[in-house]
Amino acid sequence: APAAPTFASVACTTLTVNWTAVSGAVNYDVYRRTGACGAGAVIASNVAAVTYNDSGLTANTQYSYYIVAKNTCGSSANGTCASQTTALQPAAPAAPTYASVSCTTFTVNWSAVSGATSYDLYRRTGACGAGTFLANTAAVTYNDSGLAQNTQYSYYLIAKGGCDSAQGSCSSTTTLTTPAAPAAPTFAAVGCTTLTVNWTAVAGAVNYDVYRRTGACGAGTAIASNVAAVT
């Protein structure tokens, strides 16, 4: 009777059953049972090779196999049984989140999914919908760049393991835009050696650089950088 089979290329719905040739055997019948070892049903007959590619299986499920050797004289006793569990299909990833959003770059982040070995990231310009493959990565973060200013981008992920997950949830973010030029400043608390410069906030601005020139308006020199206030 054949020895216990071994297994290779185990995926979510497929695996390969291998066994050692038996002296005098012409071909083999392959038996399978869902669950632990026990009486199985023949899934392939008169296999001349010592390998069989099984398919149509269910992810994360135990299957048991044994082999019967055959020749013109008859069939051997049932071979020794061995079991294998198919790979776990990863769950669909949650919607990604975003950080360090700027005019042309930002970081896409997502939560790890059990059973995933890597992730395919998809991007779409505009609202959520069918996207275009952007990258495969084993990380749970991706720095996207070369984007357009003031543009909405949508992302979703597919987790990959023994097989691919369903498409993950989608989310969107919008890049920043270069702020409009500020209006002319106004002045307050003008003294002999001091004054206060005030200006109106500009949509999309994070901070401001203040320039000064002695004399009439013209090219000035920065006297304060990255001022978060409007004064």
Image (tube, helix red, strand yellow):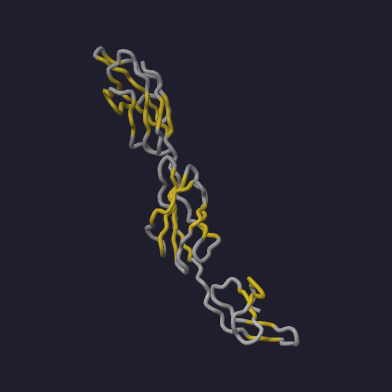
Q: In this view of the protein, which residue sits in the foreground, 156 or 29? A: 156
Residue 141 as seen in the image, left or right of residue 86: right
Q: Residue drawn 26% across and 23% down?
A: 46
Q: In this view of the protein, which residue sits in the foreground, 69 or 99? A: 99
Q: Residue drawn 30% across and 26% down?
A: 42
Q: Residue drawn 36% across and 35% down?
A: 14
Residue 174 at x, y = what percent? 48, 66
In the rendered view, would you say 90 is above or below 181? above
In the rendered view, would you say 15 is above or below 157? above
Q: Quadrant of the N terminus?
A: top left
Residue 131 at x, y = what percent? 39, 57
User: Where, by quadrant of the figure, is residue 20 drawn?
Assistant: top left
Q: In this view of the protein, which residue sits in the foreground, 58 or 169? A: 169
Q: Quadrant of the C terminus?
A: bottom right
Residue 1 as seen in the image, left or right of residue 190: left
Residue 129 at x, y = what percent? 38, 60
In the rendered view, would you say 183 is above or below 104? below
**Residue at the extreme left:** 72
Q: Residue drawn 41% across and 52% down?
A: 167
Q: How many marks?
A: 0
Residue 177 as seen in the image, left or right of residue 25: right
